[in-house]
Image (spheres, rainbow, N blue to C red):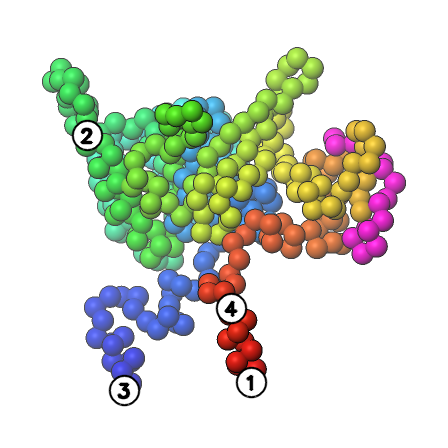
C-alpha cells in the first residue's frame, strides 16, 4: 500500500480521496435557465447556469429578486423531475400565481414559513443533515433582509428598547454552518436579501446581513433598475445585474435584463448590448441596426429596428450558430483560468538554452 492510499484509508472523513478523484472538486452540477444572460451572470457562459453553493440576490424592494430566484427554481425542477424546492418564506409576498407564472409545480415546493433567524437556522440545518448527496434539492430563502432575531422579538414582547446585537451573529452562524453542506451535498441555495446605502459623498450599495452573508456567498448580485416606458406609461423595467462577487464571473460585470408587465422576462435581453459592444451588430443609421460579416468585416445593409432584434429567437440562434458570439461572451464575462504566476521572460530564455 502506498503512502497516499494509506492516508486516504486512515481518514475518518467520508469524501477523502486524491484530488484527481475528488467528488467535491469534480465538474460542478450546472442547471441552465431559459435566459442566456442569466446563465452568464451565474457562471460566465450562455450554456452555464445555477451551481451548488450560496447565491445571494440583493437589492431594494421591487427589484425582481424573488422573480430571479423562482426562475432558477423552475430551471432546477425542469432538469430534475424528482427534484424538490425548499422555500423558506419570511415576507409572505409571493402568491401562488407567481409560482404558476414560472411553470413551477406546487407539489414540488415545500413551503416553510419562518419568524426569526434562529427558527430558520435550526430547521435548515436539520434538513441539510438528513439530505444525502445525489438527492435533488434546491433551497430558496425569501428573504433574510427583514428577518428579525429571536432576541429582538423577545425584547419587543418584554417592552425592552435596547439595541439588538445578536442578529448579525446569528446570520453569520447560519451561513457558516450551511456553506460546507451545500458544497458537500451538491445543493444550490438562493437567498434574497436587501441592500442599504453606505454613508459618504459617493454612497454605494452594501449587502445587508453583516459580513457572514458576504463571506459565505459564492455569488452576490446587487440589482438596479430603470423604467421602460411606452409613451408616458411604464411598460416594465430594465434591470441591471451588478456582479458584486463570483467564483466564475468577473466582478463588477453589469448584465442587463428586461422584464415587461405583459411578457415577463425577455429571454434574449442583454444580448443586443453585448453584440454591439463586440462589433457583431452596428447602428450605422439612426434607429436602424445591421449585422457584420465577422470574416470580412463588411457591414450588411441596415434593415432592423431594436424591436426586431431584442426578442427574436431565430435571430439569436442564428447568431450563435454562425458566429463565435458565444465565445466572445464567455471571454468578456468569465474568469480566466490561466497561469497564476506571470511568466518571467528571462527564465524562459534560460529554459530555451
Q: Residue furthest front?
A: 346
Mark 4–mark 3 Cα distance, whole angstroms, equals: 38 Å
Quadrant (top left/top right/bottom left/bottom right) for the C terminus: bottom right
Mark 1–mark 2 Cα distance, whole angstroms, equals: 64 Å
Is there CB contact under 8 Å for labels 4 and 1? no
Looking at the picture, how far across and down is residue 335, in whole percent? 51, 54
Does 304 appear in magenta? Answer: yes
| Numbered range of the magenta stretch | 293-307
Sequence-first disc among 2 and 4: 2
Q: Depth check: 283 or 263 in front?
A: 283
Looking at the picture, how far across and down is residue 210, in whole percent? 30, 35
When asked about the image quadrant of residue 138, the answer is top left
Sequence-first disc among 3 and 2: 3
- Seen in the image, is 252 located left or right of residue 130? right
Residue 75 shows in this picture: no
Sequence-first disc among 4 and 3: 3
Q: Nearer the viewer, mark 3 or mark 2?
A: 2
Residue located beneath label 4 in the image? 343
Is residue 81 positioned above or below 346 on the image?
Answer: above
Amino acid at each position: 500500500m502506498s503512502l497516499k492510499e494509506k492516508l486516504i484509508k486512515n481518514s475518518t472523513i467520508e469524501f477523502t480521496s486524491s484530488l484527481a478523484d475528488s467528488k467535491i472538486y469534480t465538474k460542478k452540477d450546472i442547471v441552465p435557465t431559459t435566459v442566456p444572460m442569466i446563465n452568464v451572470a451565474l457562471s460566465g457562459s450562455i450554456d452555464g447556469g445555477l451551481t451548488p453553493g450560496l447565491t445571494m440576490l440583493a437589492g431594494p424592494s421591487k427589484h425582481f429578486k424573488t422573480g430571479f430566484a423562482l426562475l432558477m427554481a423552475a430551471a432546477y425542477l425542469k432538469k430534475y423531475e424528482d427534484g424538490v424546492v425548499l422555500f423558506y418564506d419570511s415576507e409572505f409576498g409571493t402568491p401562488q400565481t407567481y409560482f404558476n407564472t414560472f411553470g413551477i409545480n406546487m407539489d414540488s415546493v415545500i413551503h416553510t414559513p419562518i419568524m426569526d433567524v434562529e427558527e430558520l437556522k435550526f430547521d435548515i440545518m436539520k434538513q441539510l443533515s438528513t439530505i444525502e448527496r445525489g438527492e435533488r434539492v434546491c433551497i430558496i430563502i425569501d428573504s433574510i433582509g427583514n428577518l428579525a432575531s429571536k432576541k429582538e422579538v423577545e425584547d419587543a414582547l418584554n417592552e425592552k428598547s435596547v439595541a439588538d446585537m445578536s442578529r448579525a451573529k446569528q446570520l453569520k452562524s447560519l451561513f457558516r454552518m450551511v456553506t460546507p453542506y451545500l458544497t458537500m451535498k451538491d445543493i444550490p441555495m438562493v437567498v434574497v436579501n436587501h441592500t442599504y446605502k453606505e454613508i459618504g459623498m459617493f454612497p454605494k450599495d452594501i449587502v445587508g446581513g453583516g459580513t457572514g452573508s458576504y463571506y459565505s456567498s459564492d455569488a452576490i448580485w446587487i440589482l438596479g433598475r430603470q423604467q421602460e416606458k411606452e409613451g408616458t406609461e411604464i411598460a416594465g423595467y430594465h434591470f441591471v445585474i451588478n456582479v458584486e462577487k463570483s467564483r466564475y464571473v468577473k466582478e463588477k460585470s453589469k448584465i442587463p435584463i428586461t422584464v415587461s408587465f405583459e411578457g415577463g422576462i425577455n429571454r434574449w435581453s442583454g444580448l443586443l448590448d453585448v453584440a454591439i459592444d463586440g462589433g457583431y451588430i452596428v447602428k450605422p443609421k439612426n434607429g436602424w441596426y445591421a449585422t457584420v460579416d465577422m470574416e470580412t468585416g463588411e457591414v450588411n445593409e441596415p434593415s432592423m429596428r431594436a424591436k426586431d432584434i431584442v426578442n427574436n429567437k431565430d435571430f439569436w440562434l442564428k447568431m450563435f450558430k454562425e458566429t463565435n458570439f458565444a465565445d466572445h461572451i464567455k471571454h468578456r464575462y468569465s474568469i480566466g483560468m490561466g497561469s497564476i504566476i506571470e511568466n518571467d521572460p528571462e527564465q524562459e530564455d534560460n529554459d530555451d538554452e
